[in-house]
Image: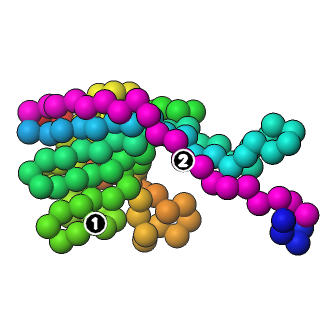
Amino acid sequence: MVESGVVDMPYNTYCDQNRTIVLGKTRINISHCIDYTGPDGDGKYQSYYDYETIIFEMDGETVRVRRYKDTPEEASLLRISDSLGSRLLQLEDFDRNIIKTAVSFLVNSGAENVMYLDEANQASGYSQVPQDENGKLILDHYE
């Protein structure tokens, strides 16, 4: 019990429904996950997140994406892993085939708003994937 009188509950993560899709040279692993704290004695949760983790693998590179169940029209690119290690995406990464493939897959599966975790964005922590002068995702046309 903490000083406020609120009981600390453990944070739990549960993932299931792993499935794999192979598109050309790209392997896509999709897991359904729920992170939660609770329920308390009244059946209430302190936190509850229902989402998919999508991992794209191609040519020794990996991109991790998250898509929440309550906002399926949105998807967020979280990290890229390559020969230099795991890190947040930089603008020059959007020229990589794995990023183009990931964004194209997300758009084709219903994501209207594709963002990336951006440490430079102090307001929300996320920025829009680059767009052309007409507001269309530059990567949307990648084949």
Closer-to-camera residue (96/46): 46
Overall secondary structure of the magenta section: strand
Q: Which residues are magenta?
A: 5-24
Q: Earlier in the sequence, mark 2 or mark 1?
A: 2
Say above or below: 80 vs 34: below
Residue drawn at (89%, 67%) of the image: 4
Give amino acid for label 2: Thr
For the residues labelled 2 and 1, say whether their Cβ atoms are less than 8 Å apart. no
Closer-to-camera residue (110/140): 110
Q: CA distance from mark 2 to mark 1?
A: 22 Å
Give the image location of residue 43, x and y in percent.
81, 37
Give the image location of residue 57, x and y in percent.
19, 47
In this view, the mark in front (2 or 1): 2
Closer-to-camera residue (14/86): 14
Residue 79 relative to residue 68: left or right: left
The image quarter containing residue 104 is top left
Say which mark, if any, is on residue 13: 2
Residue 35 relative to residue 81: left or right: right
At mark 2, the secondary structure is: strand
Residue that label 1 marks: 86
